[in-house]
Amino acid sequence: MRVSSYLFAGGGLKNFVVLPASVVDRHMRACSGAQLKALLYLLRNEDKPLPAEEICADLAITPAELEDAVQFWVKCGVLQKNANTLSLFVPKGAQDGLPRYAGETVLLRAQNDKDLSTLLAQAEQILNKVLTPADISTLFGMYDWLGLPVSVIAILLDYCHSTGNDSMRYMEKTAINWSDEGVRTAELAAQKVEALERARTLHARVAGALGIGGRNLTKKEREYIDVWTGTYGYGLDEILYAFEQSADNTGKLSFAYMDKVLSASHEKGYRTADQMRSAPRPVRKSAPAQKKLKNNSVSSIDDSELFKPFWEIIEKDS
């Protein structure tokens, strides 16, 4: 049975045609002229009932082509349909992550989207498992919501899997970070992985040199190391010097104390551990001598302050 009219609910925007980027990025090649004309016409004539005959007459298309166009954009996930009312599909978003999609909706979309179909197949091979509906939703969020190319997502999945981080939640956060950093080509993704591998190797070397075993470094500890090596340009020798200072003065390994040592050394221009060791040490002022009183109480008043000559000249900076 053919629908007699359509209503597109645009959400209040007037004199604008709000076109989802996915239409241009993913569906321009696959959609027909009639399908594209119908979508643009619906988006332009929002919030008013449109008889099917009027749409067909204005677009010079048949009723069958109009129905086909509506079904095409619903299957692509561009439009959603409630009875005869159409609206742009906006998935419900998670509080801090990607939107969540029904697995069936994504698989239906994959039937008409070769890149998405390829992504799901590659993901199963890389992760060596059958994808769950939650996995499919996350992968589709990376692909459609973040707009990451299949090649970038594949590199990301392979890196996470190779480092033992098989949690899809971890991969989701990584994808969001890469998107925010502008990692949107296979070349940039490869460079990102190379940098992450260097950092991971360095973190392991520092942890080994400091005798940290049986646990992973915390996020804060990794951030300290990244600053010491990346921002300050220090190596293991300088980090070990800071550890010696921490052990001598606090009796324990303290990243916060080490950071103070290395931050101060950087500000003073010391580039090597030898320069740090040979740097002059600040002279500590001795505490004023305590004086016993007749009642055996103790006075901490410095006598030298009491018996300064009244005529002593104190020079002040001009």
Image (cartoon, rainbow, N blue to C red):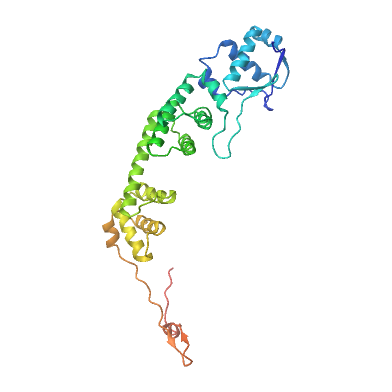
Residue 308 in sight here: no
Q: Identify which residue is drawn at 48% across, 88% down.
A: 297
Furthest residue to the front? Answer: 130
Q: Identify which residue is drawn at 44% across, 48% down.
A: 219
Q: Left or right of 313: which side holds 58?
A: right
Q: In which quarter of the image is the N terminus?
A: top right
Give 315 or 208, whichever is nearer the viewer.
208
The relative height of residue 114 versus residue 303 in the rendered view (above or below) is above
Counting from the top left corner in percent of width and height, residue 128 is at 41, 30
Furthest residue to the bottom? Answer: 294
Give 23 or 208, whichever is nearer the viewer.
208
Residue 80 in sight here: yes
Q: Identify which residue is drawn at 73% across, 17% down.
A: 49
Counting from the top left corner in percent of width and height, residue 160 is at 41, 36
Counting from the top left corner in percent of width and height, residue 58 is at 67, 9
The relative height of residue 147 versus residue 303 in the rendered view (above or below) is above
Give 210 or 58, whichever is nearer the viewer.
210
Q: Identify which residue is drawn at 31% across, 56% down.
A: 240
Q: In which quarter of the image is the C terminus?
A: bottom left
Q: Find residue 13 and report its image quarter.
A: top right
Q: Find residue 196 and report its image quarter.
A: top left
Give 269 or 234, whichever is nearer the viewer.
234
